[in-house]
Amino acid sequence: MNNILIVDDDARIRGALSKFLQAKQFHTDVASSGTSAIKMALTNDYDVVILDQMMPEMSGTDVLLELKKFTPQSKVIMMTGFGSIHDAIEAIKKGATEYIQKPFDFEQLSSLIKRCAEEKKFSQCLEKLDLDFTLSTLSNPIRRRILKLIHTHYGIHLMKIASKLDIDDHTKVVFHLKNLMKTGLIKKNAQKGYHMTKEGMKAFNCLNIIERHLSD
Amino acid sequence: MNNILIVDDDARIRGALSKFLQAKQFHTDVASSGTSAIKMALTNDYDVVILDQMMPEMSGTDVLLELKKFTPQSKVIMMTGFGSIHDAIEAIKKGATEYIQKPFDFEQLSSLIKRCAEEKKFSQCLEKLDLDFTLSTLSNPIRRRILKLIHTHYGIHLMKIASKLDIDDHTKVVFHLKNLMKTGLIKKNAQKGYHMTKEGMKAFNCLNIIERHLSD
DNA sequence: AGATTTTGTGAAGGGAAATTCACATTTAAG
DNA sequence: CTTAAATGTGAATTTCCCTTCACAAAATCT
């Protein structure tokens, strides 16, 4: 079920679009102005926003820019007037995902929405992959300790890590080191010393942020 | 194996203490001045620092204050001169974990160290519990989505969450909600609506910070 | 009151993560 | 060169997280 926001000053279009898309199993909200659209987008997290270019007060482009600021993850389809190719290109440049020229076939819009929703789902997956990896890596206390150790002891070796962590079975440490390497947070040099990567530093900073944040 | 740092300007005491404690299976480093002690503490993460009160340049108290700034997790035992109860009390007030009056029985110091090391292990457990819980809670993408949802929709109800997340089996959502409640990130009001706690807000902010951090 | 929806519990099962063990290879030391 | 220490691999096992299912209690609707 996708959340759609329809923004148009023309009540007839709003109504017709809303009805049609609901029949297509989308969940739709409507807004009659740019300001109300932004308010709704702030609290409701829409997958796709369908935006009329020509509106009094705020133009579609203005609304688009605001939406990109506050809810950049939402996909935006801009509805432009017939023949205004220029407007359409401008909208895409400013971050709209798609555009459609009035008057248009509702079926055409529907497939456009589907494509946008798919795209959104996909880009979310990509983002979440990183976050998932980082968080699940850091959620293990042993790996956190290893990361800290490697941070303070550049090029530290396996057995040194094991002894510092009071772990008898070195293969256990190997397991977590592999894990950290697989996620790209640390690397091993030719002398088999472990050191952090750029990503590792990022993750390490994240850890510090969390620790500071949670302990105040 | 505990890491101990011995700080004393008197070489004889340093040597004797070091030898004695090594025989007791502690790992010991020595420093002859406050400044070198601080440098070592910054890179080595000692469990217990044994600190002489009377030293040229930096007094033990000065060193103590610096240590508390940079490595607050280390426990500090202050060695004070005979009869200077006042110094001892001041040291404790300023954050020393224990004190011992010169001249002292080495065995006595050894048991003091053991106690400190235990205490450190314990306090670390407490800290890490929170961090562990929070991180492992946040490492699950469903729980992250629930947290976001509850953030934007104060007092949202179970089925609403399930439908927003496109999850058919509500018991799955219940599972994660319980999880979030157990870690104290969210609570349920009398009307069975879910809302965030202070801790939840903290965690939520952490998440946002991390997301920004990882995506740049 | 009866039906339906919402909310909740507990047990069973799948599967990934982590630990342990047995053993191989490489490197360093005497 | 021999020995010992350090490093590494793969399989077996355990543990823990998550999902699913069957079902029950509570709240809401008609």
Image (spheres, coloured by chain):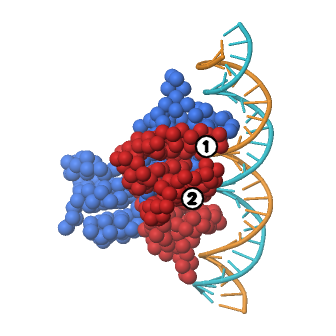
Chain colours: A blue, B red, C orange, D cyan
Q: Is residue B115 visible?
A: yes
Q: Which subunit holds the residue at mark 2?
A: B
Judge from the rendering whether residue C2 lies leftward or rightward of residue B178; answer left or right. right
Q: Secondary structure at mark 1?
A: helix
What residue appears at the point 46 percent right and 61 percent down from the top-left corner?
Answer: B84
Viewer-closest of A122 and A169: A169
- Spot occupied by residue A122 in the image (x, y as percentages of width and height): 47, 47
Mark carried by residue B123? 2
- Spot occupied by residue B182 in the image (x, y as percentages of width and height): 60, 67
- Counting labels gives 2
* Residue for badge 1: B21
Quadrant assignment for the C terminus of chain B: top left
Q: Which subunit holds the residue at mark 1?
A: B
Q: Is residue B156 visible?
A: no
Q: Amino acid at mark 2?
A: Ser
What residue appears at the point 35 percent right and 55 percent down from the top-left corner?
Answer: A72
